Image: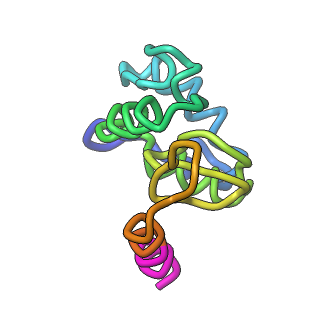
Amino acid sequence: MDGGTITSEELGGDQATALGSLLDAAPRAGLDLPCRSDDADLWFAEAPAELERAKALCTGCPIKAECLAGALSREEPWGVWGGEIFERGTVIPRKRPRGRPSKADMARDRAYAAAMSA
């Protein structure tokens, strides 16, 4: 463990299968994980504002990078993983409220998708 973080390599294993081990080891190592200390439902909320709150709580998480890598490799169907919102196995910039999106929202989402794929 180095600088308040812990990685799957330190536990042995690949990113996808080591996330459970990281989640279990972090409290024993004295690391605070927001997904374990806050309301777990927040990371799978329907309301966009609640998902943004979960993303913000992930900012300082010591296993954020491992969590995101594991979620990407597993193609998580939904929720906040590693500080990003997943929907149907891909990262989305934000969850839109119900209803038709504005043209500005659609343009911003396309730009985000292009940046993520680059």
Residue 11: which quarter of the image? Answer: top right
Give coordinates of residue 65: x percent, y percent.
Answer: 45, 52
From the viewer's perspective, tell me whether residue 12 is left or right of residue 39.
right
Residue 86 among magenta residues: no
Residue at 36% from the left image edge and 36% from the top image edge: 61
Give coordinates of residue 101: x percent, y percent.
Answer: 51, 59
- Looking at the image, the residue that sits furthest to the left is 3
Q: Which residues are magenta?
A: 110-118
Residue 88: which quarter of the image? Answer: bottom right
Q: Nearer the viewer, residue 24 or 53?
A: 53
Q: Say above or below: 23 vs 6.
A: above
Residue at 58% from the left image edge and 48% from the top image edge: 99
Q: Nearer the viewer, residue 105 or 48?
A: 105
Task: Look at the image and tell me whether residue 10 can be seen.
Answer: no
Q: Say above or below: 75 vs 67.
A: below
Residue 116 among magenta residues: yes
Residue at 44% from the left image edge and 15% from the top image edge: 38
Give coordinates of residue 78: x percent, y percent.
Answer: 67, 44
Residue at 52% from the left image edge and 80% from the top image edge: 117
- Looking at the image, the residue that sits furthest to the bottom is 118
| Secondary structure character of the magenta stretch overall | helix
